[in-house]
Image (cartoon, rainbow, N blue to C red):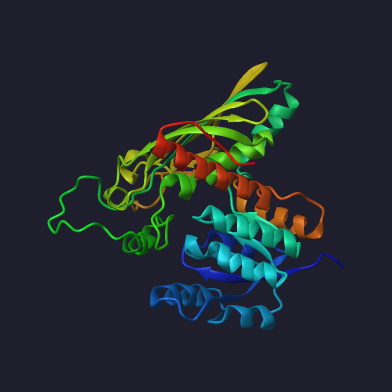
Amino acid sequence: MSTEKFYNCIVLSMVKHDYIGLAIEAHPRTKLVAVADDADNPSWVHERNLEFAQRHNIPYIMDVEKAFQDYGADFVVICSEAERHCDLAVRAANFGLSIISDKPMSNRLSECERLFHSVKTNKVKYMLWNRNYLPALLKTKQILTDRNLGPINSFHVDFFFSKDSGPPKSSSNQSGEKIDWLSRQIEAHADGSDGGVGNEPMGELMIEGCYPLGYFHFITNDSVKSVFCSSLTHFHQVNFDNGVEDLAALSFESVGGILGSVAIGRIGAHSHPNIGEIRLHITCQNGSIVIAEPRPEIAQFYRNQPISDYKNLRIENFNDLLLVSNFIGCIEGSETGVLNEDAALHISKVVDACLQSSKIGMQVLVSQ
């Protein structure tokens, strides 16, 4: 008879993508027991929470602390608007619950620091959801270890995400009114392009920057010392109207002396047949590696194929289940978190430094 412990999870708000909740449901050692949120949220938030709860046959509780008290959870999953990530997480940590959070850690560095200290004070575990256990990344770690390629000298990531963000920049706008950020994100939920859902506008550095910076942390176990960043709004009118970038390039130097760079952008669904152009280039002392992050994959084409259906399907992709297993290992003390509160806070500091650099046009030191 198995003696493995099973872990119960409360979903704190499910207004974005449901992939984290689905991973919890699919893992053999975790179970969804409730969805919870605050009663004073707008109706669209309650509608999404209720839809997820009904789909998974679990209750929806419009009282977060009551859900903590009544449902015997071991941890929470947070998929709220970005500006609520940290507040919900701190309340969970204060109740002694560990936390898995959708990205970003927060859209404000002060909130990230508040959450970091709460996690440490309450001695709970924290994971920022990530893509570090995709097959190509795991194989890269193995190759770097097995092939004796020597120290890493340079590290570059292309992270161009082929999802739309509404009408293209400079499109005809008869009314002359600016596109409201939250209204656009609510609309974008239908096709899964609402990565920046929330009241406060966010650019791609904040929405997706944790992924390429997470790759760097995962592969090198190094941290970023300084950055220089340029950014602009090139593709999407909603980004232009709300003063946030959809394209950026940054160069950096790590504490360990690695020279790195990232090119990141939301380039639109018409630009690529798959999820986007996501590729890593790593140069070592004795060789180099080029990694196509979405591969291995199978291309599929068929009559009347929906426009939202990716032509290239990832295979051997157990990223989400592996992340949950890693999180369980952290709770049980047998593993180190793949993207824990230390790494998540550091990435938030790097993103903040990038945003500062792009405004002043100068190199910015990352606070350590």
Q: Quadrant of the N terminus?
A: bottom right
Quarter location, residue 111: bottom right
Residue 202, position in %: x, y?
41, 52
Q: Which residue is at 59% across, 47% downward? A: 317
Residue 85 position by quadrant: bottom right
Q: Nearer the viewer, residue 55 or 173?
A: 173
Q: Nearer the viewer, residue 122 or 157?
A: 122
Is 183 on the left or on the right of 9, as rendered? left
Residue 254 can be seen, yes or no: yes
Q: In the shown orientation, is residue 304 left or right of residue 135?
A: left
- Quarter in which the C terminus is drawn: top right
Residue 124 seen in render: no
Q: Is residue 293 above or below residue 153?
A: below
**Residue 52 image offset from top left, x and y in percent:** 50, 72
Whole-percent x and y of residue 274? 42, 42
Question: Residue at image x 40%, y 59%?
Answer: 200
Query: In the image, is 168 to the left or to the right of 279?
Result: left
| Position of 162 relative to 33 (above/below) | above
186 is higher (above) or lower (below) than 270: below
Q: Which percent across, then down, holds residue 137?
A: 62, 38
Which residue is at a point 46% across and 75% down the rendered structure image?
51
